[in-house]
Image (spheres, rainbow, N blue to C red):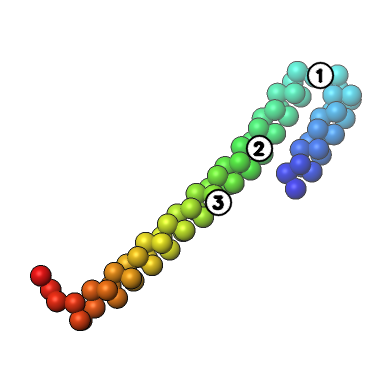
Amino acid sequence: MVLTGIIVILVAFGAAVFATKEFATMFAGVCGVIGTIIGAYFGIQAGQSGKARVEMELTKAHELAVRLAAYVGTSTPRR
């Protein structure tokens, strides 16, 4: 999906440069748009990766708490 968007933008850029012959002005706009799309894509990927890692650590901590609670239960004397 991202690649398709970039290709469409580059085709539109080529058509605009061909029609107006102003390469530098058009190139600046294209760089901004493509940079924004790529930055958003990788930002979302990094966020999802971090979320998955945190959820895995939370699950491990919960399992440890349940095991400790089961061990401490009512049969273990207090100190």
Q: Earlier in the sequence, mark 3 or mark 1?
A: 1
Q: Are marks 2 and 3 in contact (CB under 8 Å)?
A: no
Task: Please report whichever mark, 2 or 3, sits nearer to the chain's N-terminal start.
Answer: 2
Q: Position of residue 34 (x, y in %)?
A: 70, 34
Q: Residue at x 57, y 42 (%)?
A: 43
Q: Amino acid at mark 2?
A: Ile
Q: Is residue 70 above or below residue 14?
A: below
The structure residue drawn at horizontal position 33% and vertical position 71%, both measured from the top left corner, is 67
> Does the CB distance between marks 3 and 1 fall below 8 Å?
no
Residue located beneath label 3 in the image = 48
The residue carrying mark 2 is 38
Tell me whether circle 1 and circle 2 mark residues in contact (CB < 8 Å). no
Query: Which residue shows up at 29% across the image and 69% down it?
Result: 68
Q: Earlier in the sequence, mark 1 or mark 2?
A: 1
Q: Residue at x 80, y 19 (%)?
A: 23
The C terminus sits in image quarter: bottom left
Residue behind mark 1: 22
The residues bearing labels 1 and 2 have C-alpha atoms spaced at a distance of 24 Å
Q: Quadrant of residue 10?
A: top right
- Does 67 sit left or right of 28 as displayed? left
